[in-house]
Image (cartoon, rainbow, N blue to C red):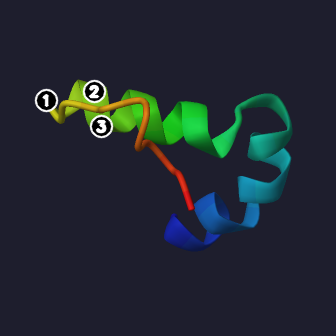
Amino acid sequence: MIVGYIAKQKEHHHSVAFADEYRAFLVENGVEIKEEYFLQD
């Protein structure tokens, strides 16, 4: 199950950007995001 999930990540991120997926995950779990700091170097 996990191996299949990991194997499909490259294909998955062609349609859904990592940042968008991560943002949705955080919001769904009640984490407040400050966009000015979100995934900044």
Rendered position, 41 above or below 32:
below
Image coordinates of residue 35 in percent, x first then y, are 41, 29
Nearest to the observer: residue 7 or residue 24: 24
Tell me whether the residue at label 1 lies in contact with that at label 3, contact meaning CB atoms closer than 8 angstroms: no
In three-dimensional space, the C-alpha distance between marks 2 and 1, rounded to whole angstroms, equals 5 Å
SS for dot 3: helix
Residues at circles 3 and 2 in contact by the CB criterion of under 8 Å: yes
Q: Residues within 10 Å of mark 2 (few under 14, many from 20)?
A: few
- Give the number of marks: 3
The vertical placement of 4 against 26, above or below, is below
- Farthest bottom residue? 3
> Which residue carries the number 1 mark?
30
Left or right: residue 34 compared with residue 22:
left
Q: Which mark is residue 26?
A: 3
Residue 3 at x, y = what percent? Answer: 60, 73
The kind of secondary structure element at disc 1 is loop
| Residue that extends furthest to the left in the rendered view of this protein | 30
Is residue 34 left or right of 3 when viewed as pictured? left
Residue linked to disc 2: 27
Image coordinates for residue 8, horizontal then vertical, percent: 75, 56
Q: Which mark is residue 4?
A: none
**Residue 35 position (above or below residue 5):** above
Q: With 35 as the anchor, is 4 left or right in this view?
A: right
Identify residue type, mark 2. Answer: Val
Residue found 13% across the figure and 29% down from its top: 30
Disc 3 residue crowd, few under 14, some 14–19, many 20+, Cα 10 Å: few
Q: Quadrant of residue 13?
A: top right
Instruction: Return the residue nearer the eye: 38 or 29.
Output: 38
**In 3D space, how far apart are the residues under numbered discs 1 and 3 (Cα atoms)?**
6 Å
Instruction: Identify which residue is drawn at 71% across, 31% down.
Output: 16
**Tag 2 near tag 1, CB within 8 Å:** yes
